[in-house]
Structure formats: structure tokens, C-alpha cells
Image (cartoon, rainbow, N blue to C red):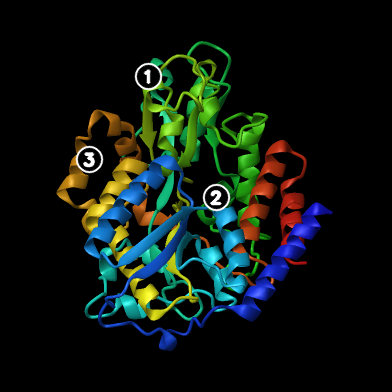
Amino acid sequence: MKKLFLAALSVLAVMTLAACGGGSSNSNEVNVLDTLPDETINITFWHTYGQSKGELLDAQIAAFELLYPNIKVEAISQESYDGLKDKTTLAIPAGNAPTMLVGYPDHVAEYMLGDAVIPLDKFIEHTTWGVDLSDFIPAYVEENRQYADGLMYSLPYSKSTEFLVYNKTVMDANNITIPNDRALTYAELETIAATVVGNGENQCEYLINYDSPANLFINITRQYDGGYTDIDGNILVNNANTKLGLNYFLGLFQDKTVVLPSAWEGEDYGSVPFKKAWTCMSVGSTAGVKYNMPSQKEIDESDYPNDYLQGVFEVGFAPVPQLENGINSATQQGPNIAILSDSTDAERLAAWLLIKHLTNVENTVDWSMETGYLPVRTSAINSDEYQTFLTNPEEYQANASAAINAALVQTPYFKYDPAFALRTSSASARRQAEIALVAIYLETKTVDQAVQAMIDQLTW
């Protein structure tokens, strides 16, 4: 009953947003000022970052305010992406939404229902204030321009992808070398599992954990050239290739080659089981590198007490495994940054200037080196400072650097999910993909039953 009430409340909020949106998304109605007004301009920026990332963001904003003394930025953390989206959805019709915010494409698609977010194209193309989109990672630009009218409703910001971290001590003891310049194949994982999965010395109970069942489900559909969803909100999972991939992974689950966090009660991620050496590998976000490090020096002891650590072992990093002779796919994730329409021309220009500042070469490099997110600009990746970080990092940056190096191997095959908020939403599709794969892992449903349940939930 509670879930039904929350679902109804969410639908009501979206309907209210659509009826009471604070402006229009039509690019012809976005007026870009040629000069920044002299009077004080106050803008609010909602994000999700905790203390360490929040402090770095605050420092970058402080530098921005020195450049533009009449712009005052109030940056507020809403703690989680879902919490930020829910709060924004309720704030828009109430007239107290922020000037700008971070969010995923499906969040932006929902805001677009009520013309509550503006396209940024006129800012991007402006002779004084514009940016060169060709310098941004092409896949990131495509993600932000995927909407029906082909306009840019956000700019890439804290982008990340998944990477593979592995117990190098165990691999070395078994004379197994993991390449870091290419992805392992699933067939290679099976071969490695035959040696390292077990209860003996230099073995783990499972070979590889995947933190995100949703990402794994979606990558399976891509690698097997199956179907997932499209921009029109069609659910395309009921096909032979998708089911072939899911049945293959059922076998990998059963022989303990692959595991999901649901194997361990109370664990949402595989970082703790990896540090306990219950699993020899784990796939997670580049933004969470530090949580997989079995070292007192690199983790917060208040979050990870000593009894979680089974001694310190050496780790290695590699790209996410792929299907041999399949379609390579790596999840492109992390939020973008947008401007809401309930704002004045002066506030919009101020917000745009902050977006430009946060995504310039210097700041996207610093953000990446300190957080594990990826730079959004090609020139940033090629900069001397970033290349030094990748090839000869400071000691405390070594793990982040190695993980990002592995992640950058995947850049040519980054993929993003279609974003929609129609009869169902892309966020709901991701949630049902996760539920389906967990059910297959736990064997509470067959592949056919899990796929059908997903379709039933998303097409009612």
C-alpha cells in the first residue's frame, strides 16, 4: 500500500509540474544577455555531494565568485540523486526550485514535461559566452542531446564509468596476469574462476562481483545485440538475444564466476566483500575507487572498522569484461548540469557562467584527480597536468589514476541509456532491470519469467 501511495504521489507531482512549469523549454524563448548586469545576482545550485567532494566544489565556486564578484552562489547538497529529483519535482510547482542542479538524463526528461528546464544551445553558441562542444567527449554530448527536439538541456559534468578492481596478490599467487589495456572476456573469466574460486589458500568464494545489477542487465542486452529500451519508452527486452545473454549469466551465477551484492545480507555494494577477499574481483564506479582499497591509509576507518579488513593485499585495475565477438559496451554514467526555467535572464547567465567555470579544463582536471570522476573535455585529458596524473601520480593518487587509466580504455564504447518520462520512465526501466537480474541470480524466477515480469511492470 505504501508503494502504491508513493507511486500515486509521484504521478501527481509530475502532473502538477506539467501544469505549473515555471517557464518554457522552447529555445526561441531563451534570451541570452550580451553583458552581465552590474547588480548582485543570487543563484542556487542543488547537488548531491558529501563533505569531501562538497568542499572541492565549494572551493571552485569561491574561485568563480572572485571572477564575478556580483554573482553569489548558494550551493546546497541534497545528499542523493533520488532525493534531489523528488525535492525538485515538488519545488518546481511551488516556485522555490533552484536556479541550477545536477541530474541524470531521465531526471531532465521528467523536468521537461512541465517546461521546467531550459535548453542551453543559445548559451553554447553565443559569441561571448559560448563553449566549443567539439572539445567535450562526443558520447557525453550525444547523451545530453538525445531528446526529441535535438537540443542540449544539460552539459556534461561529473561523468564516470565502471571499472574492474582485482586482488592482484591472489592472481599473482596463481600465476594469472590480468591485462589493463583491454577488457577480459567472459570466457577468460570462466577460466580464471576454475583456478581461484574455492575455499583454499589464495582463493575466493566468488570470482567477480557487479555492484550494479541494472548496469549489468543493460550491458548484457547491448553486448548480445538484444533489446532494452528506446527513446520512445518502448520496452524491448522480450527477444532471443537478450534472453540468451541472461541465461548465459545464470550459468555464471550458478558456478560462482559472477555474484551480485544481494549474496551478502546488508550489502548494497561489493566493496566490503572484496576487501574481505570473499570475492577476487569487483566492478564498480570510478567515483568509488577508495571504497575498494584494503588499506587503513586509503579508507575512512569510521566507515570501515578494522574487523572488515583481512590484511592488506595488492590491487590491480582493468576495464570491465566484455563478450568475446559481441558488441563492446561500457556504462556511461554520472550526472550532468542543467538550468531550470523559473529564473531570470540574469540568473540564467550567471548559472551558465558557473557551468562554464566548473567544466573548464582546470576544474574538470582537478575534479577528476580528486574524486575519480572523468574529465569531460578531450583537452583536459590531454593536458600536461592530467597526463602526469595518469602516468606518474602522487602516491596518494595512485589508485585513482590506475582506475581511471583502465576506464579510459573503454571510452570508444561508452553507451548511455535512452532517457524518457512518458507512460513509464527510464528510471523505472532501470529499476525493473535490477529487479529482474536479482530474481535471476536468486533463482526466484526463470529468465522468461523475469523478463515477462519486467514487461508487465513497465507496460501497465
Whether residue 184 is situated above or below residue 40 in the rendered picture: above
Label 2: few (<14), some or many (≥20) within 10 Å?
A: few
Q: Residue at x 51, y 25 (%)?
A: 304
The residue where tag 3 is placed is: 389
Distance between the alpha carbons at the discs numbered 2 and 3: 29 Å
Q: Dots 2 and 1: beta carbons under 8 Å?
A: no
> Label 1, label 3: how many angstroms apart (C-alpha)?
26 Å
What quarter of the picture does the N terminus occupy?
A: bottom right
- Judging by the rendered image, the residue that carries numbered circle 2 is 80
Q: Nearer the viewer, residue 235 or 311?
A: 311
Q: Is residue 444 above or below residue 326?
A: above
Residue 434 shown left or right of residue 317 in the figure: right
The amino acid marked with disc number 1 is: Asp
Which part of the image, by quadrant, shows the C terminus?
Answer: bottom right
Q: Which mark is residue 172?
A: 1
Identify the amino acid type marked 3: Phe
Task: Identify which residue is drawn at 46% across, 34% down.
Answer: 188
167 relative to 250 in the view: left or right: left
**Alpha-carbon span between mark 2 and mark 1:** 39 Å
Image position, residue 216 (x, y; %) = 56, 47
Sequence order check, earlier mark of 1 and 3 = 1
Give x and y (percent) for residue 184: 42, 38
Disc 2, SS: loop
Closer to viewer: mark 2 or mark 1:
2
As shown in the figure, which amino acid type bears the numbered disc 2?
Ser
